[in-house]
Image: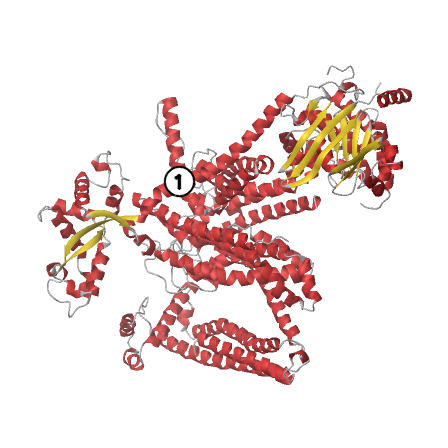
Amino acid sequence: MTDALSPAAGIPKAKPARRDIGIKRRYAAERRFRAYGIAALSFGIIFLLILIWSVVSKGYTAFQQTMITVPVEFSEQVIDPQNERATDPQKLMTANYPILARNAVAKVLGVAENDRAGLRAVNQMISDGVRTQLRDMVVANPSLIGTTQTVSLLAAGDLDSAFKGQIDLSVPETNRKVSDRQVGWMNQLAESGALAKHFNTGIFVNGASSRPEAAGVGVALIGSFYMMLIVLVLSLPIGVAASIYLEEFAPKNRFTDLIEVNINNLAAVPSIVYGLLGLAVFVNFAGLPRSASLVGGLVLTLMTLPTIIIATRAALKAVPPSIRAAALGLGASKMQTIFHHVLPLAMPGILTGTIIGLAHALGETAPLLLIGMVAFVANYPTTPLDPSTALPVQIYMWANEAERAFVERTSGAIIILLLFLIVMNVGAILLRRRFERRW
Amino acid sequence: MNMMSEAAVEKALDQKMSDVSHKMIGKDVSVYYGEKRALFDVNLNVRENTVTALIGPSGCGKSTFLRCLNRMNDTIENCRVTGKITLDTDDIYDPQIDVVELRARVGMVFQKPNPFPKSIYENIAYGPRIHGLARNKADMDQIVEASLQRAGLWTEVKDRLHESGTGLSGGQQQRLCIARAVAVSPEVILMDEPCSALDPIATAKVEELIHELRANYTIVIVTHSMQQAARVSQRTAMFHLGQLVEENDTDKMFTNPDDQRTQDYIMGRFG
Amino acid sequence: MSTSLILLIVALIGIVGYVAGARRAMALAGGLSSKLHSRPGYYGSFIALWAIVPALLILAVWLVASPIYINSSVRSGFPEEVKALSEAEQGLNFGMVSSLARGMNVLSLEEIERVGSNPAELRAALGAKGVPLAGEPQPFMVEAAGELNTMTALSRTAMTIVVLAASLAGALLAFRQIAPRFRARNRVEKVILASLVVASSIAILTTIGIVLSMLTEAGHFFARVPAWEFFFGTVWDPRFAAAGATDSEGQFGLIPLLLGTLYIGLVAMLVAVPVGLFSAIYMSEYASPKVRSIAKPLLEVLAGIPTIVYGFFALTVVGPFLRDLSSQVNGLLTGDYMNFIQAQSVLTAGFVMGIMLIPYVSSLSDDIITAVPRALCDGSLGLGATRSETVKRVTLPAALPGIVGAILMTASRAIGETMIVVLAAGVAARIQFDPFEPMTTVTVKIVSQLTGDLEFTSPQTLVAFALGITLFAITLCLNIYALYIVRKYREQYE
């Protein structure tokens, strides 16, 4: 401001000398602003990483399961002392199989038969799931009775946690679920190679169970699969048909305006409201069975439709009018133009939108809770009308369980769910890359 | 106080014309957009207190060159400038030079009027405010009034300074943008086809304004219209295919150009 | 004949009709398809449509209507003393009848002969076949079950005949219309267009379904509990919903739930809005293309993670962390290692929800910011403004309406979010303003009232629909207003 005519006095006429325009201060502000941006961005990304890390670090062990491999004696004394199995087939179903497993492990550990506390402690190390495991073996092949077979037995959830190092052994013995004696046995068995971690196929195939070591997402996977199938079969054709009408045929009037606003709003309606709709209309009014994956599929279809319609309309809009003009100019009807030219060109965009909509539906939990899919389902559903559960709902149910081993299962199930979502999204991205067209 | 007498202006102008001093000097300026080269070793000097017109067919690089003069090209991704441009004695592409300070000295008016969606007053006050040119409200009022006076808009808008700038007509909007540029007291004003979106009457007003501004500012204007170049400028530079074809006094350029291509363009044979 | 078999036969008639139609058209045109008005396939499709569509419509109507008719006529045959019972008990009776009817289909004729007169034996016989009965069947039930079975069988036969006849008649009628100049394509396209219209009205039907179903059920609720007690009540204590209980002793005050919803939503927005907005600004104004190409998809991943995962994260990581942190801080300051943040709290739920909402805010505001014309930013930069000055003084003010719209949309998402709050906010419905204490929300209560055994007559169940319609109304208003603002905003710059 060395010039006599400072800006305050008007516009300087001659060439002004260098003015002080607060460069330093302004650049400090600029850097601060930029730093806020970086901080905000890092905040989001750091939490993403923490979230994924916490799930993976807790959950990867769920894909391993501790098993105790011991020779089990299928003693006739225990299974069928009165030799009634020829006349009463129920006998083999109701026999006390866990005793067999307990005795087998106790024998390997050298626990005396009259050491009742010891036997009870041994029994706690073995999952109650051995009941069905051994029963199924015997029922399938009754000639096993009286023989000795080497069998891999499921370890109990607490022992599994202890073996994976998830239980703090420095805590006083009375405050933890695994006693020092059991830990000693565990180490003894591990050294002899009888106790080892195996790949846990159970988590993929088993149904619900109150025992974490025997619980799996098998039923939930089937339920989710049925629902995705229903969503795909219903929402893709309906969504595409609706978009074609709205984008290509609909006259501009109040009715189509209403549909337009409606669809945008439906896309933003909280998902739980769709659950209420499903409960009131499909379950209470139409009388479809609660907990059925059919109802879940229908609810998710209604929820996914707006997403698919919005994506499809965008894809149709992106096809340049010149294509339509060319086809119409050759004498094709409007319908032929759309189905022969516009729709195939828009297909990659439509499919991408559909996959993303499906991925969203796959992770949706709240509406399924309302239509009763929070059920303890141990058996595989054979049709979409059978009671079933879904992967995210299974996660919700496990998250409410208190046991340490269930935290691991829950994280494991989340990993499975996230893997599915990653596969779907990567598929959508590849599809978009592969067929992306620049007009 | 804030207006010089007519005679003084003329006198100052004559003096400036006689001893040629170059406000900005471009030396071997080339511009690349990614792989594509848009400007080829342009050497062009901008004289002080003169209106320099850049003409040439579409895509010849005249706007690109203009945007180099206050580094607006920085805002375009993967745009690269080589060569040297000086303002007075400063190399404006020197890392020492601050782009904000440079743009406060070299203002710009764009092709389409782009008033901020704020009041007329706030539009003008924006520049002085960010650069801290006014100490108080009275200072600011004065800058706003003076700038609007300069742009010949004062009488038209003085009663509605607090209405939105986007409510003005196209020509008024463009003069508002010029006033906005003037309010920062730049040394050079760059104008990128400032009249291309205006009707003939508005264009005439803006041209008149450019003529008056010459007394205090160095002006570089890109224009599509040869008549406009002839009307407003003293120097003219002709671009073709990214190269500077000819730079000359406007009078000479339009009567007896040195280069055949200039001749053809002016006669309307291409472009 | 089973429904799927009928469907199969109708489909077969359609296929045969298609082939016949196409052939017939070609024959009439003397083998020259150019003489035909439409391609031969359209003639075939015309016949197939006539064979299939009316038949399917009849089938659908029949399948829906006949059980309703049969049920009511069977019920009207119930003895007077049964009819005098309440609606729920009549329902139980009818349930018995229909299981009986199902069971009698499983039994062989002589078995029915043998046990038909003795209810206890009948129950045992059915149990052996895997059809459990809720109680001893009474004689009138056996009779009604027989009637039910007869009527169902009759209805099924009639349906088979009518549907197949309709299919054949449709095909024949259509076949007779075929002529070389017959405009088959136009007819077929009309049908396609009609189906497109039907598909797009499903959106409307969904909305109507939501509003109607919730209004009806909420209406039942308000018949028991006065509306003002619900909307202005400050105590939420619904008591237990015992099966069959019809007393409305509980208190259903919306206020504590609504406050909890808004409070948690507010905390979430306090996290999501600044972080999301600054991320969007950084990515659109500063970040190099390389940084953007990595950071943007990463943020989008946050949006793709199911909310149940966030809920689990809040429950097992954030909640315990905040609790332990507070006890450490408290210990350092006062020496008393008592945690002042509960593991389930407004803060935990709100914070995690905020993280979930970051990508919504950032992608919505990114769209809005890039919609601001470049000329405006250039104008500001050309005057010598720094980037941050341009953003603060030109871009953001210009984008403000759009950003407000984006924030409103995000807020509606926060209000409707369920799984995070179910796992992390707690279930205690109370009015308080300490962010470190648990509160509960409308969505949590909808879930907790509707899981477990449902009794569509008790207010404890029905209140969920009243909560639902409240939630729907709030989010709908927010969304419509937000969409309106954003639309206006976009028009301004187009």
Q: Do we see residue C69 in this rendering?
A: yes
Q: Nearer the viewer, residue B36 or C341?
A: B36
Answer left or right for C198 relative to A132: right
Where does residue A289 sit, x and y in percent of width and height?
41, 63
**The quadrant where residue A20 appears:** top right
Query: Where is A107 relative to C123, above or below?
Result: above
Q: Which quarter of the figure is the N terminus of chain A placed in? A: top right
Query: Where is A72 relative to A164, above or below?
Result: below
Q: Name the subunit of mark 1.
A: A
Q: Nearer the viewer, residue A153 or C285?
A: C285
Q: Residues within 10 Å of mark 1 (few under 14, many from 20)?
A: few
| Disc 1 element | helix
Farthest-out residue, right: B7
**The quadrant where residue C48 appears:** bottom right
Where does residue C237 sit, x and y in percent of width and height?
43, 45
Say which amino acid is labelled 1: Trp
Where does residue C134 sit, x and y in percent of width and height?
33, 66
Which residue shows up at 46% across the image and 34% down it?
C435
For label 1, the residue is: A53
